[in-house]
Amino acid sequence: MVSDINTLLSHPDKLLLTHVQGVRDNTKKLSSSKIAELVALFHDLGKINPNFQSKLDPDKTVNGYANHSYLSAYAFFCTFGCSIQNMEALKQFLDVDNFSQNDLIALTVSIAKHHGNLPDFSPTDHTGTGASILSKDENSALYYFLNQEKNLPVYEFINHFISINDFRQFLTTQNVQRGYSEQLVFKGENNKSALDFFLDNQFAFASVIQADKADAGKIGNIIDDQLETIQTFSKCFNPQLDLYLGKLNQYSELNKLRTTIRNNAVLNIREGLRSDEHVFELTAPTGSGKTLMMLSLASEIIKEKGAKRIIYGLPFLSITEQVEAEVLKIFEGNEEFIQRIDSKSENHRFETIQAELDDSPTEEKILEANILEFQENTFAYPFVITTFVRFFETLLSNRNAELLKLPNFSKCIFLLDEIQALPPRLYGFFVAYIKKFCTKFNSYAIISSATQPNFELPVNNSDAKNFFSDYEKPISLLPLSYFENDLFNRYQIEFEKEPIDIETLKDSVLSENQSVLVILNTIDDTKELFKKLQDKLETDELLLLNTHFTPQHRKLKIYLAKRSLRQDKRIVVVSTQLIEAGVDIDFPVLYRDFGTVASIVQSAGRCNRNGKLNSFGRVKLFKLQNRGKIRSELIYQGKDKEILRFTKESFSEKQYQEKELLAVQKEFFNRIQSELNFARHSQNGIKPDFDFIKDIVECQFDRIGKFQLIDKQLFGEEIQYFVSRKLDDVKFEDLLTMQGELINLIKKNADRNIIRQKKKSIKIQLKKMSSQIVQVRLNRNQIKPLQGSEKNYFGLYKIAPISYSFNQGIDLQGAECLI
């Protein structure tokens, strides 16, 4: 007997048809894609299975087949892949003239995988039994179930939403089952536009999983609510920013020039927007006020194009904190619309609710906690500040948890600063990719840097030009003539081309009678130079700065350095490259070990940054040789040797004023654009190298989704250490207690909501601890520091006090620490 579809459940307390319609409605709010709507209609069809219905009853034990996703996908395939009449109904639903086998495969796979991750559509055969996009074992179990279960209301379910002919005989036809298992072969080269196909299906999949979680999570009209908050914030964005700008000191020559530059950029973006441009390039000198400029440009986009979510992307955590502080100051009184989201960010309302839940877990508080978690996981705030890692890895992701954010990348304004921090081979690829994404999903982007790469496609690369067939490089918002202004000609580089050793470097630094910032390429070099200087300088005259310190101590050291500079007291800071971008600090003298052009120029931006010296600031560029190696060659090795070579050949002279560096940068970035392999990327553990054009053509979602901006394996195993502030600091012990409580709850099969809340409590505890956590990359020959506890929390250890100090950071011995 066929079940009545009106009585079937999707969840213990929700009717299946109600849930499917809810997901469909949510999907349509997130996307105009008919593909997404179709996946929404089919995603939970498999829950008609009586075994699944029994699973929803806690008093029943179920042993039969109950994978609803695979049943949903196969039913979709049989409905439209085996009937000409139904295929015509499908085309009518999608409003298309043509529907290819690739389209059928993409929709089938999206339905099958909606609780997991998008797989490779062109998988490699590792077993010798033939490659398969979907699991052959899972399909075999499905076929066995269908051959036993003859009365599934599959036709009734589909016909409820789309008028179709009966197709049920195909479900158990052996030839259909064999073809589904063995001949579901994707041919990416047949797609008219590979990039459109990839983006359309990735975005549709992402829209459905967000819509599904919103409906299943019983979190009300959260999608509607977030759209309303964007409207509300957009209305106050422009007047509040204008009010803040109006209060700035307009009397200094530098601020007058900043205002002129900002107004010029705004005027140019206004013209670009009226020509329907979506992506703009902002190249402005260091110290020209890029943050306020980018906010002003976002304001202009909102004026011209209506309310938009703003996502401000930055390469480093330290800069996200600085931008957050500035944005909160500008939009004082509207803080609830702004959220920094990264590995160390905090949400104070979330923490308050969580504390209340620990005492009294009411349904209201659980609902609010779920809404706040959903907002963070989906970037559902009107103004989000985040890292490049989260932004760019989401754009290319195949993972369910990451793709939750992707629908909220539509109708957005992306403010992407310090773009030169991306891998050089991917400069042009990512900008072209973003431009396509923005045009397709009604978003806008400002690509900003003081050292702007060349974003043109390589002249002789036909693959790139065919792939990005309608691409034109972003419109420049500013003339380069501002780099010629004397107010931005603040330092002079003196290039010592012959290698020097660390002893010579020490003597040179000590000979300076002013404050000095020394930027070196490796942690070990900073530690060694620091120790040599310690004997010659007072404690309050010397600071060491690298990633072997907690974020809290790094922040304090930068504050101490700034205070000494303000008070005109001599201070020598020895740092790695972490200080070179986004840190607003101003030294009269700067020493920089050789690196790439982009890094050198970024570092030099910390010298006479505010132009207060009567003469040029002095930047001494040198090649450090230590332990028998040129240190820059240690960092830039393998395929990155080419990038270092371009820099060496670009720096042909021994002396450069700041304004003369524009020509050096242009030559460097032109060579990257023309001589490096476009859209190729090396990453340990991924063989062969990423070839993003080829991988996207083949829809290798899983392979592409493994992309990481930071290659974790290259620089050793990453281990985290918690550094106690005082002897009575018990945050780590509290974390272990919470871990034990969670394990006990799981063992006792406690209520899912209680387990979920305990996991959230642990997440909040980790964020509270984040400013005291050091991330260390250990190579094989390095000795781990002493631990303050035998226990660990998933690779997070407590370090013994003897192994860490404010002056020298974490104590490691053995092989070299590179970053």
Image: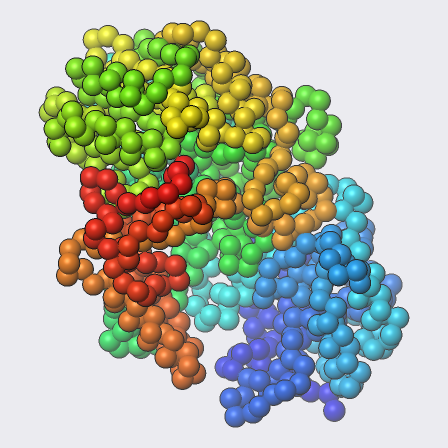
On the question of residue 277 being in view, the answer is no
Q: Quadrant of the C terminus?
A: top left
Residue 684: x, y in percent?
56, 44
Q: Position of residue 142 (x, y in %)?
A: 73, 76
Residue at figure coordinates x 50%, y 71% from the top left: 216
Residue 243 in the image: x percent, y percent?
A: 25, 33
Name above or below for residue 24 compared with residue 239.
below
Task: Check the image and report above or below for 357 versus 334.
Answer: below
Where residue 153 appears, x then y in whole percent?
A: 72, 81
Residue 115 visible here: yes
472 horizontally vs 153: left or right: left
Q: Is residue 105 above or below residue 650?
A: below
Q: Residue at coordinates 61% horizontally, 46% vertically from top-left?
A: 686
Relative to 228, 204 lies left or right:
right
> Relative to the observer, which residue lies in front, 226 or 130?
130
Query: Left of 356 or right of it: where is 228?
Result: right
In this figure, which colouring scheme has been used for the structure? Answer: rainbow
- The quadrant holding residue 171 is bottom right
Instruction: Please state the total of marks drawn on the protein image.
Output: 0
Residue at image location 32% in from the left, 15% down from the top:
620
Identity of the residue drawn at 39% across and 38% down:
816
Q: Quadrant of residue 301?
A: top left
In-front residue for pair 40/677: 677
Pick whichever, 488 or 306, lies toward us: 488
Locate the N terminus and report the quarter of the image it occupies. Answer: bottom right
Query: From the viewer's perspective, is 577 left or right of 58?
Result: left
